[in-house]
Image (cartoon, coloured by chain):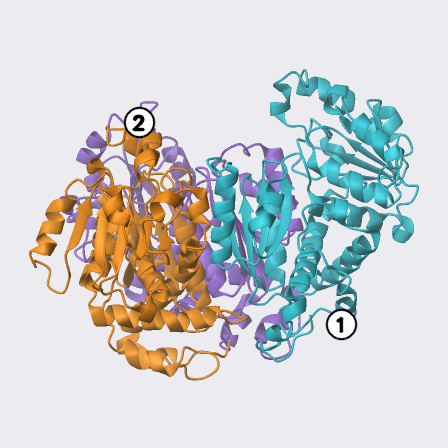
Chain colours: A purple, B cyan, C orange
Amino acid sequence: MTTVVPAATNAQAVAWHHRHLIDVDVVTCPEIALIMRTTDVMRGILARPIRKVPALNGRRVTTLFYEASTRTRVSFETAARNLSADVVSVSTATSSVTKGESLVDTVRTLEALGAEILVMRHAVSGAPYLAAEVFGGHVLNGGDGWHAHPTQALLDLYTMRENLPGGDLRGRKVAIVGDILHSRVARSNIWTLTAAGADLWLCGPATLLRGMDRWAAAWAGGAIPGHGRFNVTSDIAAALRDADVVMGLRIQRERMQGGLLPSLREYAARFQLNAERVSLAKPDAIVMHPGPMNEGVEIAPDVAISGRSVITDQVANGVAVRMALLYLLAGAHEAARVPAHEAARGGPRAR
Amino acid sequence: MTTVVPAATNAQAVAWHHRHLIDVDVVTCPEIALIMRTTDVMRGILARPIRKVPALNGRRVTTLFYEASTRTRVSFETAARNLSADVVSVSTATSSVTKGESLVDTVRTLEALGAEILVMRHAVSGAPYLAAEVFGGHVLNGGDGWHAHPTQALLDLYTMRENLPGGDLRGRKVAIVGDILHSRVARSNIWTLTAAGADLWLCGPATLLRGMDRWAAAWAGGAIPGHGRFNVTSDIAAALRDADVVMGLRIQRERMQGGLLPSLREYAARFQLNAERVSLAKPDAIVMHPGPMNEGVEIAPDVAISGRSVITDQVANGVAVRMALLYLLAGAHEAARVPAHEAARGGPRAR
Amino acid sequence: MTTVVPAATNAQAVAWHHRHLIDVDVVTCPEIALIMRTTDVMRGILARPIRKVPALNGRRVTTLFYEASTRTRVSFETAARNLSADVVSVSTATSSVTKGESLVDTVRTLEALGAEILVMRHAVSGAPYLAAEVFGGHVLNGGDGWHAHPTQALLDLYTMRENLPGGDLRGRKVAIVGDILHSRVARSNIWTLTAAGADLWLCGPATLLRGMDRWAAAWAGGAIPGHGRFNVTSDIAAALRDADVVMGLRIQRERMQGGLLPSLREYAARFQLNAERVSLAKPDAIVMHPGPMNEGVEIAPDVAISGRSVITDQVANGVAVRMALLYLLAGAHEAARVPAHEAARGGPRAR
């Protein structure tokens, strides 16, 4: 436990100045590069026999999940514990606390109980902004409604860079296929991938692309400086042809209510990422999925475990990315008292 | 982690001899003073950058909650972890285990699994007494039915003393407003506040004060040595006028069943702690609430976050009070076999 | 925390070569003896004031419970923490994840999140075999359907040996009474007790013994080398007469559906382990139960807490047995890459 995060990372950490991370829309390219480099360091830590560093020793991370999510919650908690933070876990399976007032009261209470970094997931888009208004520490968004899932977009980006020559996405074709309309994963990925210069294609049934064409038009018109255009289509062949990256999104059964999907069977027939369709992509294209998968619906089981699949890499990289973000957020918080992290347990610590 | 609880506190700790803490009725004034002083020490620890001391290193604290309660459970668990105890958390959302036999079986099992201090919450008044009969360690009541919530009363007392000149409650007017009948918070507060010499007023609709007048008469008749009289009224103006402390209690929706309350709206109209009513109290009066609040019912949102409100202080003090109680209970337990724990890592430990 | 598991145990650990423990059917007599000796060592650790050793420091134990089970889950987690492992706890109260595909996806995800030892409970018999096929670490079965509950059988064996002169079960009469048909506890106990040479009797209503006679015939015919024969009967007096060990099994209310039991009352009248029936056993016979008990159904309350009862000893021994198994499994895993972990805090560690 005497190992600390290399000093090089600390030097870079001065470039990070966001108090919260609620979406990637406000994160600049140099900041994304900083996150990627910090994630490299965390990957190195995860490769050690004892995957624990004292970077956040004594710091309090509280997870507040208003939606069930084993994998994301475990990923954040593992990341926090790897950094030696104390973790408090609050899950609210019941939706009795969806009113804004209750969220505010809960956040104030958790802060009074000692929370310094609040990782939250909420079914209502924008809920983390409300929490950030009243919380004295840092808010890290673990997914809010259809709005944003910034840590997923960042781990996706990290995984793509890891698998592309030179780690460069410029001009690389990335196809995201599935329920774009309801996907916070897709929305956050649009920001990071257009910033990285990827040739992004969003694909799905027209009912699940609603509104995306107008967003694409704004992007294409140069409304968002620094972000390239992207494509929206229901033509799966056009989306997948010569792609470098193919990403499937989860199709939820409840989407069939309201007439958005006639049936899962029909979705699978037209859009499932199966071996035949994926063969349209480049020979060395990778297949991704944010999980949990409905194997047999949006992705065929053999594709999910094929040599092209980097789906479990995404999960493993998720821990490293979340370690990096917790580390950077805590460091920003500590800007005034930076030397703190240089001294691990076993010697005097300045804080 | 080399910091220990100051020796001064240890000297005082010899005065603590309760094996369990199920209600405050058996706690004497000097013992309350000891709890308050120990809480001061714990507050000092919470003010440090690393809020952790090894006082209960290797000791086992098990929380057994038969009622859902995020804030109280997290408060106890945070307190236990701050003292370096190992924490096991058992929640029984289902009420399938309300029979006495099952409780006894569960308590015996948790002890065999290693539990030394059992923090329990149960919907049935008196359940902790049953647990204490069969449990070899310490039982700390986290709330049982309508009966008692001793840690809440002690954190309330600590918060009042902190906000009153000289920390003295003698002659200070304290008004508790709400559903007194069903409130374990009110019942435990009656014991501590009448012992502290406060001028206590309990206020609410007549249906939610049932039986309180007889209890007040016993107190007034001197039946309880060392405890002063208290007042029971449905006249909210009389209760609040010139009060030093105004405390609201949660009104639960289910109380409207059985005809105890005509509607939440009517309750709010007559008893809500709003700005106008609170202005009847002294200019520097404080506003308290045990949480979780129904803002807009028993308390107006602007009052809850006003400068008078010490509601989040209550939450923060709750961690310190619970640290103090865990520390005192564990110390009493260890009186006979103290040297054992001195063998812990890092040499002899002051306890 | 400087105490390590004595070197003597390490020497023996070389004899352990199972990667997973899914049932006791594949565990040989010398291996059972090794587990018993390792459990002795763990018992010694549990008797210390600080019951924690760094044996699994930095190792990741994940519990994955698809069935609710407070006591077994807490037992495993306590065992893992006693060995300083990091514990991640995943409970899936909802049965939405019972399809094989989902289990495989979940197991792969947990591994990618860092799980090294997976303790799992599942309602479907055989589910751990499926998990073991895709999991890169160790699978430890915490109970699967009617199939197996190996840690329960091993703690039962340990508790019997502890209470029998010389710790020898050869020729000792053991009666297991209750719902044999649906009991994974009974099935795993058949393997360990017939291997230990006990005179085993399985007893219950004929409807709850279905198929057991054929299994007994195979055993009696010598089909299973190294395992002695056992008896199956509905005659409770014959089962209990002169028994050294009497074990009750839980009768579940849902068994009455499908006509297997007319009523709990009738079961209790004919098969309940009450004082009168238990008096048929030897004067110093012990009474066991895997818990949780339905006191008043399969066992009388006075028998459950009588001097003969070793039921809470079973719970306490359960922690020690699970520590032993986690230790042995982790050791087998590490055989190839031992030096890595020697770099841990405090210098080289014996493993």
Task: Please state which amino acid type lies under the numbered disc 1.
Answer: Ala
Under circle 1, the secondary element is helix
Left or right for A310, reference B235: left
Residue A41 visible in this rendered orientation of the protein: no
- Residue position marked by numbered label 2 in the rendering: A256
Label 2's element? helix
Going 33% across and 58% down the picture, which residue do you hit? C156
Q: Quadrant of residue C154?
A: bottom left
Residue B341 vertical position relative to residue B270 in the rendered view, above or below: below
Q: Nearer the viewer, mark 1 or mark 2?
A: 1
Crowding at dot 1, Cα within 10 Å, few <14 / some 14-19 / many 20+, comes out as few
> What is the C-alpha distance between the residues marked 1 and 2?
67 Å
Position of A168 with respect to A136 (left or right) is: left
Q: Residue at x 68, y 67 (%)?
A: B335
Q: Quadrant of the C terminus of chain A?
A: bottom right
Question: In this orientation, does residue A228 appear?
Answer: yes
To which chain does the residue with label 1 belong?
A: B
Q: Please name whichever residue, B350 or C281, is drawn nearer the observer in this view of the structure.
A: C281
- The answer as to whether the residues below labels 1 and 2 share one chain is no
Q: Give coordinates of residue B300: x percent, y percent.
A: 73, 30
The structure residue drawn at horizontal position 57% and vertical position 61%, both measured from the top left corner, is: A330
Whole-percent x and y of residue C244? 31, 57
Image spot of residue C95 (x, y percent) = 32, 38
**Callout 2 amino acid:** Met
Above or below, A125 against C194 in this view is above
Residue lying at 28% horizontally and 72% vertically, measured from the top left: C34
Near-viewer residue (B343 or B80):
B343
Q: Is residue B341 above or below residue C141?
A: below
Q: Is residue B271 left or right of residue C106?
A: right
Q: Position of residue C125 (x, y in %)?
A: 22, 47
Residue closest to the eye, A65 or C222: C222
Give the labeled residue for mark 1: B7
